[in-house]
Image (cartoon, grey):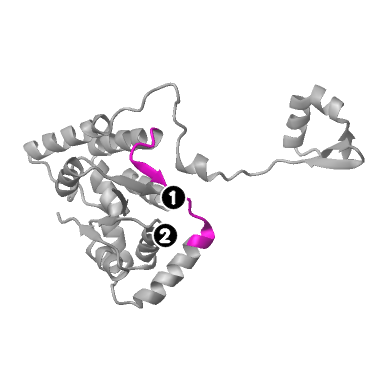
Amino acid sequence: MKTLSPTKARQNLTAVLDKVKRGEDIGILHNGTVYGLRVVAVYSQDQTTLTPVASDEAAPPWSEIMAPVFKAGRAARARGAKPDPNPILEERKRRR
Amino acid sequence: MTAYADTSYLLAFFNPHAAHSPSVQTFVMRTPVDYHWNVILRAELRHSLRRIPTAANRATAWQAYRAAEKWRTRLVHQPVSLQNFIDLAEARSLEDNGASGAGTWDLVHVGLALLARTELFLTCDKAQSVAAQRAGLKVKCFTA
């Protein structure tokens, strides 16, 4: 493993991280301890569950979010269009 | 009120013209409800949204879903771990003992609703509603 001092690592951090990403074994030596750098897969429930909210914008009211759905539903019913089947119910029927 | 809506309901909710949409949408317009929201519902809903056969309905449903998720409007995040998931599946199966006709995945939703201490369980699926009632949940089942 190649080791760097914290100062050296900080000065070339981007290059060091690129090397780690390419698979080089690099560590940082600090007070006699080597801290290894490695690429890790991150699982964050927040990231996978929810898209971050833009904090400087006000959230639209629920009625505004759902308005296109209600409008399209009314239009489809007025046209006499055949409703879509519910794939979840069909999937469950097959599974049970 | 915060409800646990299973994916059959959520799909009818976002799809403008699905079989159960009129009854679900009428309920939504009359009853202000927040929804428990977890990674399992999310994965199931997104997969189902992709399978909406009518392109225009699919596009409208995705647009509304994305906006709801972006703004976290009416979605109450419920953290769920893999261990929760496994424990709930086993515990609910043991309780149900095959009586409701519900599958493993259905019982997991019932378990998640119990874990969330939900006030109401919403579904468009009869077997799912039976399983939820057997678990002591207050249930509203929507018909087409």
**A33 over B120 or under it: above or below:** above
Label 1: how many Cα within 10 Å (few below 14, some 14–19, many 20+): some
Q: Under tag 1, what secondary structure?
A: loop
Disc 2 target residue: B115
Q: Residue furthest right?
A: A32
Q: Is residue B21 magenta?
A: no
Q: Residue at x 40, y 33 (%)?
A: B70
Question: Do labels 1 and 2 touch, CB within 8 Å?
Answer: yes
Label 1 is placed on what type of residue?
A: Gln
Image-based side of A26 in relation to B60, left or right: right
Residue B109: tell me if it is visible. yes
Label 2 is placed on what type of residue?
A: Leu
Residue B53: tell me if it is visible. no
Q: Position of residue A34 (x, y in %)?
A: 86, 41
Disc 1 target residue: B78
Q: Under tag 2, what secondary structure?
A: helix
